[in-house]
Amino acid sequence: MRAGRWRRVAGQVGRSIAVWAVSTVTMLVLAGLLPDFQLQSADGDSATRIAVTAALGAGAFGLLSALVWPLLVRLLLLVPALVLGLLVFFLNGSLLLVALRINPSGDSEAAPETAVIVAAVMSAVASATGAALAVRDDDAYRRRLYRLADRRRRANPPCPATPGTVFLQLDGVGHDVLLDAVGKGLMPTVARLLGTGDAGPPTHRLTEWRTDWSSQTGASQLGILHGSNHGVPAFRWYDKRRGEIMVCNRPSSAAELQRRAVEHTRDGGLLSADGASRGNLFSGGAGELALVLSVSARRGREHRSRAGYFAYFSDPANAVRTALSFVAEAGREIGQSVRARLRGQRPRVSRGGLYPLVRAFATVVERDVVVAAVMGDMLAGRTAVYADLVAYDEVAHHSGPASRDAEKVLQRLDRSLALIEKVAEHAPRPYRIVVLSDHGQSPGETFRARYGLTLADLVRAGCGLPVPRRARRTRSGAEARAAVRAALRRPVEEGREEYRTPGRSSEPIVLASGNLGLVSFPDVPHRMTKEEIDARHPALLTTLANHPGIGFLLVASEEHGGVVLGARGAEIPLDRLDDDPGPLAAFGPGAADAVRRTHGFPNTPDIMVNSFHDPADGEVLAFEEQIGSHGGLGGAQGRPFLLSPLVCSPPVDDGADLVGAEQVHRVLRRWLREADGPQVPLSGVSPVADAASLDDSRPALLDDSRSAALDGAPFAVPDPTVPDKSV
């Protein structure tokens, strides 16, 4: 045993010396290439003295990076994520200047801008060298995890022996897409969990579930995390009571939707006790937050969503590695876009402007920060962690759900899952890993590309209003754009005309959520009925219902309460849809229930428009500029997945369907109860508002009667006026 210990020590020393040597050579090479970086005096020095200067400079830079860097990052956690990522380079260059200044061996110096370059290159080379030396050394990797786990255990109270749970959301990955990726060998970690091929016995079960009519992250994640998505008809809609357009990825709207859900359920959320929310639209009541949109618009130090940044940026090599990957991903997107254009690929949407940078943020920066935060949560022993990885969803919107571009993203997501699994082996408590998605994506051409006009143009024509000669493009509702703005702390409304509060005009407001369209008349304070719309615009409903790109309409009715309209005069009352689905027949089982549920919302728009859907190939026509879309009914967008450990009870009974995000919330809550957590806070203690008074946001535990309280009974409700605690 002692001999093995000495071998490990010798190996560590050898790797450190090797990294030091490579860093020294790197510094010498850069001194020869860069005119503003020198390691010798103006009179010249011997080769030996220059080499010693480089060695001492590299050593001093390495020590400063290891000792001083974590302190600097901790002091800068209040700055936005992307700003911190850029600031890293300048701070890294400052450390190099300090290392050169304290070097006693010579007159080494560098211009400030050159120091930034030298420091970035040296950090990247040192990180790559260390990784290359340890890549075949599993013991070294495990020892590093053990050290991190020990450090976390010393810094936090002892963890309970009960299992914690990690919910990893792969945004936009449909059930069939996941199975197809496993069949192609793109996701070996998921294949092993399912026990496919020669992977051994399965450890997880795969369940398909069905979304609500609004098959998008805002509705699904609100229902999953907070138990209610009542009153969320789409990704964006005009709220007549508030007189403004609500957008799920706008921070102010997300905060309002979360407040409504808490008020509706009288429950703090899935993560109320000892939970962490990473990269989500909503907090779920968690006390630990990173890149959570619903709190990003709040001001004040206690509202800053900064947890997870320290865990990632405390190593300067991480920032360099992420920056290089960011540039590579942006270049990859530009190359893929050019190839698609040269091949004349159809369908195709514009992928220029800032999109390459948005994609690089979603597939690199957001992924790296969220995965690092989840790893930190597990090593800290938190009870429940919910994290969203938006990479696939962003790429599939513009490249297509089954495209080669999207498949490459699935491979990288699988590697992230494997890393989280590896960390679970070294966490201070056992962990159950649940992988799920919030919706799928349906392929298809855009409505504008097929017909040469947008839904707004068609509505204006039906109202007898002038239509622009040139159809305007609609904005994409992809979640990654909001994540970028949240990381920069830029208001989503800024510079976005379609998000500004409209006046009380008689002209209709037409909004899009994938292949779901919403039409509202802002000058009418109530939801208009079919009879009122016909009296005001006699040709509108007929124009929409008979258009070949429209599947069906939902409108209120004075006679029947609500009706579904289709082509050739089809008009089916909602209470007769089970016997005569009419135009809903092409949208599969559950469509009638989803439509009836949305009809009952207090803020349903005057006209709900669902695009045409071809059941043969699963295609829909997006009202946004997306060739992979979601938001309405039709195709794979409404069929996400739930991959759960076999030790958890089955999500539903055999033969039953798992329908709606609210039911998924109840299933996840049940699994947390089975794992004996999260626990009910002490009476009178709000799991969110009073989290600051608890050590590590860990509430005191009650006796076994807590299981009964968790089974459908409400938790203590946080005061909606008190914001979530952010650490």
Image: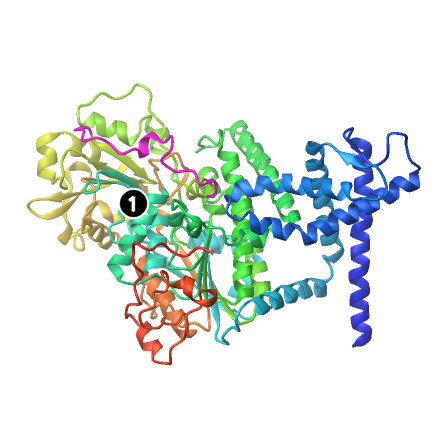
The quadrant of the image that shows the N terminus is bottom right
Residue carrying label 1: 234
User: Is 598 on the left-hand or right-hand side of 361?
Assistant: left
Q: Which residue is drawn at 35% across and 37% down?
A: 622
Direction from residue 512 to residue 183 in the image, left or right: right
Residue at position x 90%, y 32% in the image: 44
Is residue 351 shown in magenta? no
Looking at the picture, does residue 643 appear above or below residue 632? below
Q: Where is residue 572 in the image (x, y as percent from the top left)?
A: 14, 46
**Residue 586 vs residue 629: left or right?**
left
What secondary structure is marked by label 1?
loop
Asked which quadrant contains residue 200, the reply is bottom right
Provide residue 3's location: percent of width, then percent of height. Answer: 82, 74
Q: Which colour scheme is used?
A: rainbow
**Nearest to the observer: residue 30 or residue 222:** 30
Which residue of the protein is positioned furthest toward the left in this rendering?
A: 559
Residue at the spot 35% in from the left edge and 73% down from the top edge: 682
Looking at this view, is 334 or 205 the one in front? 334
Amino acid type at mark 1: Ala
- Report whether 615 appears left or right of 106: left
The magenta segment is 487-507
Q: Is the magenta stretch mostly helix, strand or loop?
A: loop
